[in-house]
Image (cartoon, rainbow, N blue to C red):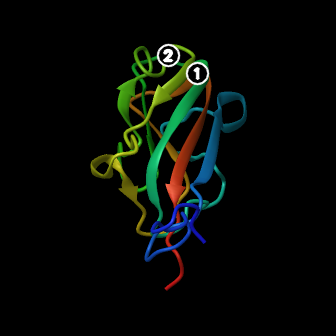
Amino acid sequence: MSVIEGTRAANEGVGYGGAIKVARGDYDFAVDGGAQGDIDLMGVAGVPSGAIVIGGFVEVTAALTSGGAATAAVKVEGADDLVAAAAVSGAPWSTTGRKSVVPDFTGANSVKTTAARDIVLTIATADLTAGAFKAVLFYLEPLPA
């Protein structure tokens, strides 16, 4: 039942609806290490197939560091779809605080998953030696057909 006559409740309609859901993945060098490659941050494919990621943030709690020129990126569906690969010596990885992700609550920048997915950190060009962050995503889950 809608609150305003002539409108629909947030969970009524076709396709997407209901509450915005949250997925969170954590990276901590002390727990996950820092070798080049992909590191799953949730430990499960917690973002469902067909989800539309509409926004979120990364909160760096300890700056990422490297003995070389490491880059870090965060993805949920494909390369660089949340945080584009960037040297850990610069933004967004070199300082603590909340950082933006690509999906910014606009249709053009949203990301649709094609299968159930984990949030993934991709480390390239050199290993990490320290750092920690939380990746928080807001998404809409499709309603059953």
* Residue kind at label 1, given as amino acid type: Thr
Ranked by sequence position, the earlier of labels 2 and 1 is: 2
Is residue 32 shown above or below 15?
above
Residue 7 location (% of width, % of height): 46, 66
Q: Splitting the image into 4 quarters, where does residue 133 fall?
A: top right
Q: Position of residue 57 (x, y in %)?
A: 51, 35
Outermost residue to the right:
31
Q: Position of residue 40 (x, y in %)?
A: 58, 49
With respect to residue 60, does 144 lie above or below? below
Using the numbered discs, state the Cα–Cα distance from disc 2 to disc 1 in whole angstroms: 7 Å
- Image position of 86 with respect to 32: above or below: above
Residue 129: numbered disc: 1
Helix, strand or loop at disc 2?
Answer: loop
- Quadrant in which residue 63 is drawn: top right
- Asked if the residue at tag 1 contacts the one at tag 2, i.e. Cβ–Cβ closer than 8 Å, the answer is yes
Residue at the extreme bottom? 145
**In-front residue for pair 80/1:** 1
On screen, residue 105 versus residue 29, left or right, reads: left
Is residue 38 shown to the viewer in this render?
no
Q: Which residue is mark 2?
A: 67
Which amino acid, mark 2?
Gly
> Seen in the image, is 31 located left or right of residue 129?
right
Q: Residue at x 61, y 51 (%)?
A: 22
- SS of the residue at dot 1? strand
Quarter of image, res 52: bottom left
Residue 44 visible to the viewer: yes
Q: Is residue 143 shown left or right of residue 91?
A: right
Counting other residues with Cα less than 10 Å from the Cα at mark 2, is it few (<14), some (14-19), or many (20 or more)?
Answer: few
